[in-house]
Amino acid sequence: MQTQSLISLAKKQFPDWSRELLLEFLNELQRIIFTQSPTNQMKVYDPSTGKDPILTTTSGQYEYTIDSTNGFDAEIWRVVSVYINEDEPIECMILDATPSESAKVIFKENPSSQNYYVRCYRFPTELVTETVQLEVPDAYHLSHVYEGLCGLIEKFRSGKSDRYDVTFMQTLLPDLLKKMSDNHTRVANTKYRGY
């Protein structure tokens, strides 16, 4: 379903809300969905190698922002691992992004001047207009996203919403994250089992 169609559907249920405000709430809901746990859709990789992006360090510098100043072209919200050899992650402090600061990596020991791989995840694309498509797969727009949006609006209006707090946050969101999670990656060569 197109973002514009979801907004039109929500507008029928909440006619007193402007399309701009509905889009703002939909954008916030998408951010809530993708910042609960790392998902395949938000994983950042180097398109030329298919590997995790590289952070180039300088000897004597311990702290690095994971943003465009250090070669990351996406808005990173979480770093989960820093490594040279994937089997041996580097011990360091990792800080998630906040509304005012970029994600950070702080090495506990001098990182020297070398390249480190950084496994990280980005924020979803901002829904600045109705033509920007949601990054949640289409199959979950009506069953999960629309329910979450309506619940979020209800919560905003009255201060509480079972539709948001119980149905969405406790049931639909965990189900959606499980389906999009790195822990549930589908194997392309799995054979179909008919019953």
Image (cartoon, rainbow, N blue to C red):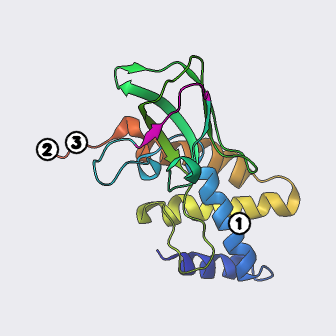
Q: Residues within 10 Å of mark 1 (few under 14, many from 20)?
A: many
Question: In the displayed structure, would residue 100 be above or below residue 5?
Answer: above
- Residue 176, image x and y in percent? 49, 48
| Span shown in magenta | 53-62
Please report the residue visible at 73 percent of the width from the left and 59 percent of the height from the top: 152
Q: In the displayed image of the protein, which residue is found farthest to the right?
A: 158
According to the picture, the residue beneath numbered tag 1 turns out to be 25
Q: CA distance from mark 3 to mark 1?
A: 35 Å
Amino acid carrying label 1: it is Phe
Label whose residue precedes the other's in the sequence (3 or 1) = 1
Q: Residues within 10 Å of mark 3 (few under 14, many from 20)?
A: few
Mark sitting on residue 189: 2
Mark sitting on residue 187: 3
Question: Is 54 contained in the magenta span?
Answer: yes
Please report the residue visible at 43 percent of the width from the left and 30 percent of the height from the top: 114
- Residue 134, image x and y in percent? 51, 67
- Residue 5, image x and y in percent? 54, 80
Q: Determine the secondary structure under disc 1.
A: helix
